[in-house]
Image (tube, rainbow, N blue to C red):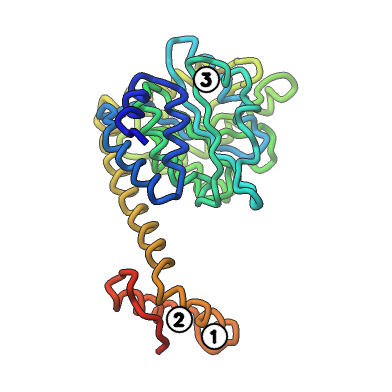
Amino acid sequence: MDVEAMAERLRAGERRALAQAITLIESTRADDRAAARALLARLHPGPEGAMRLGLTGTPGVGKSTFIEALGGLLTARGHRVAVLAVDPSSTRSGGSILGDKTRMERLSRDPNAFIRPSPSRAALGGVARRTREAILLAEAAGYDVVIVETVGVGQSETMVSEMTDLFLLLMAPAGGDELQGVKRGIMEIADLVVVNKADGALKPAATRTAADYAGALRLMRKREGDPEGIPAAMTVSAETGEGLEAVWRRIAALDAHRRGTGALARRRTGQAKLWLRRELEEGLKAAFAAHPAVAAALPRAEARIEAGEEAPEAAAERLLALFLESGGGGSGAARED
């Protein structure tokens, strides 16, 4: 692969080049990973880059309809919008299940929009491991708004906030559980709680639901550096477009505030350090699993645990010692204590 040529095509804003580059970074082949690292090293987005918007919500809340409506609003104003939609993975093929391009048909045909569904492959929180790299590629290709849509509430959605600038939680009206404690964790990281389907017979219920969330958000500890009124709860109808303009104005105002105060730069620096640690963890896990001595000893350790002859903690300590004795390399000889 001509990495320099692909980098030039990306800088020129070629959609096909962006699709090919994302396929490259999602590959697990050693040669592809080396090419992906070389490609990313050649791309230097601006110091702050695009607006990175994370979005999540329960299945059926209308995430795709909302993204299509918001994306259409933005592209009509001259923005270029990339949507990285992380789908659940098929346990049989490993491929995406939901097919976001078919659920955002109009936006997928927009020349100023790019939609990429990526299988989560069981990644924590439904966020593909290489999503952060895909964000950098989209920025390099000239997309100034990047939306990361995740599988849905119930997993560790904090990973979304660890790679985006703003986090939006989309909710449905009259769910009957608006203030459940189980949602507290995700509400604490949300910048905006947006109640969708605020139209027709559901509009009064949506208004009440948003008011309930607004009251709950006021009881939460204010985050340092955020302007007054953030986090906020709002209503929208992705179907009719009512409230969409107000939601975008609030998003844009918060983004401008964080850029102007330096909060965005600090946030991204912290995210980069965090993802360094994530990559180290993943690399260590891969090295541990590939270690010949560990690979040989692991089945026997599992057999001992199954027979009740050894505690999992003791087995783990022994396997780690085996890994470290050879310096964590791949040349250790298999042996048993």
Residue 164 figure quarter: top left
- Residue position for label 2: 315
- Pointers 3 and 2 in contact (C-beta within 8 Å): no
Label 1: how many residues lie within 10 Å, few (<14), some (14-19) or many (20+)?
Answer: some
Label 3: how many residues lie within 10 Å, few (<14), some (14-19) or many (20+)?
Answer: many
Q: Label for residue 71?
A: 3
Residue 33 picture location, percent across and down: 38, 46
Q: Quadrant of the C terminus?
A: bottom left
- Residue position for label 1: 304
- N-terminal of the two: label 3 or label 2? 3
Q: Which of 225 and 136 is in front in this view?
A: 136
Amino acid at circle 2: Ala
Residue at image point 40% right, 44% down: 32
Of tags 3 and 2, which is closer to the observer? Answer: 2
Element type at mark 2: helix
Q: Vertical placement of 316 versus 236: above or below? A: below
